[in-house]
Amino acid sequence: MNYSIALVPGDGIGPDVIDQAVKILDAAGDKFGHVFNYVELEAGGCAIDKIGEPLAAETLEAAKQCDAVLLGAVGGPKWETLPGRLRPERALLELRSGLGVYANLRPAALLPQLRDACPLKDEVLAAGNSGGKPGFDILIVRELTGGLYFGPRGRSADGSSAFDTETYSRAEIERVLRTGYAAAAVRRKKVCVVDKANVLESSRLWRETAAETAKEYPAIETSYLYVDNCAMQLIRAPGQFDVIITSNLFGDILSDEASVLTGSIGMLASASLAGSGAGKPGDKIMGIYEPIHGSAPDIAGRDIANPLAAILSTAMMLRYSFGLEEEALAVEAAVNAVLDSGLRTRDIAGIGAGKQEKIAGTKAMGEAVLKALEKRGG
Ligand code: NAD
């Protein structure tokens, strides 16, 4: 099968990590008989330097023609003083709205090799975990294009008061719920809907819509939590969660909280989907795949950045945009094998490898994952 992928390396370490991610995609293609064709696009600070705006209309059009987007990161001190509409981050917002991606998926799992990077005690990590072993594997599904960040806002005439508005329609809530349920169906089959239904009317609509939608997924256990309780439960017993589905604002905050539990920002991938996720090989669902870290200008171009978040983003692309579960698992297993071998980039040095530890740069880490992927299963 052929797939066309828009590559948007962006700024800072974006190109460093995307180079490695592409190697891994190509290796997965060779191994499983797929062809990935790339369309390289400029967005963010590099586009501002070249054409004076963060995302050209033609760039967005070109991305729309592709099956999925792999993005590095945008931004940096050079562009920080520009007015809002000319800032690099604008490119992200315009890509998201232009491609209609409305569900943001952020996995937060504790890799056993990096257990020591997690600030929680073993007994906390074991609490609520069905296996009774320390660990967690959570997927936070955040609504991305509605709610408080997009509702009417303003100031009173004298500027002494201000308001923001949380608005959601049933349709907006239902489609993101469906993305979450589809993900839960191939995971541990548990969904927790997080809201503030004891106070907010918009949250009561979330709860009503969730109760209706849940009836269509009898094989999946649905529970409900208020957001304040969820924030607490994440650090009291993270093992109890499988898929958390929530609004734009709550998802923004909870996904950052959950990411701290995993240790390093250089390890965390994300996906933003324009559908409920590919169900089988041959499907093509538009999505933007990117590491959660920024452009890290302090280490850009120095062969230091951890490429694993970008590499794990390709695994998410294979799974959620193309329904290629076996291929996604192979990439994830290759990353695991490399961590098992003791190889570490600088940001995860001193974590869990003991005497086996060997420090690698960006390229060496990418190369090691490539070898591990090629070796697996012949
Ligand atoms: P950052 O994520 O770029 O960096 C935070 C810290 O983590 C830095 O010390 C950095 O060196 C380190 N780090 C980040 N990724 C790493 C990796 N893969 N390997 C090793 N170390 C890594 O956040 P910041 O410093 O707040 O932001 C820098 C720029 O990136 C800003 O212009 C910001 O606006 C932009 N940004 C972009 C995105 C995006 O494109 N999605 C997200 C966040 C920040």
Image (cartoon, rainbow, N blue to C red):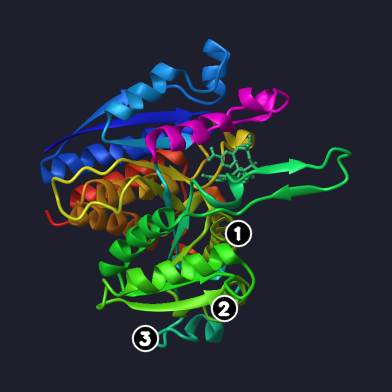
The amino acid beneath tag 3 is Gly
Which label is found at residue 233?
2
Ligand 1 visible in quadrant = top right
- Where does the image place residue 79, in percent across and percent down from the top left? 66, 24
Identify the residue at image location x=28%, y=59%.
Answer: 333
Residues shaded magenta: 73-100
For residue 372, side relative to residue 234 (left or right): left
The amino acid beneath tag 2 is Gln
Name the quarter where the N terminus is drawn: top left
Q: CA distance from mark 1 to mark 3?
A: 28 Å
Where 150 sits versus 172, above or below? above
Residue topped by disc 3:
131
Which label is found at residue 221?
none
Query: Of callouts 2 and 3, which one flags the residue occurring earlier in the amino acid sequence?
Result: 3
Identify the residue at image location x=48%, y=25%.
Answer: 43
Residue topped by disc 1:
253
Q: Secondary structure at mark 2?
A: helix
Please check the rendered image and state whether residue 98 is part of the magenta-colored stretch, yes or no: yes
Mark 1 surroundings within 10 Å by alpha-carbon count, few (fewer than 14), some (14 through 19), many (20 or more): few
**Do callouts 1 and 2 mark residues in contact (Cβ within 8 Å)?**
no
Query: Of callouts 1 and 3, which one flags the residue occurring earlier in the amino acid sequence?
Result: 3
**Quarter of the view holding residue 199:** bottom right
Q: Secondary structure at mark 1?
A: helix
- Where does the image place residue 216, in percent across and percent down from the top left? 26, 71
Identify the residue at image location x=58%, y=81%.
Answer: 236
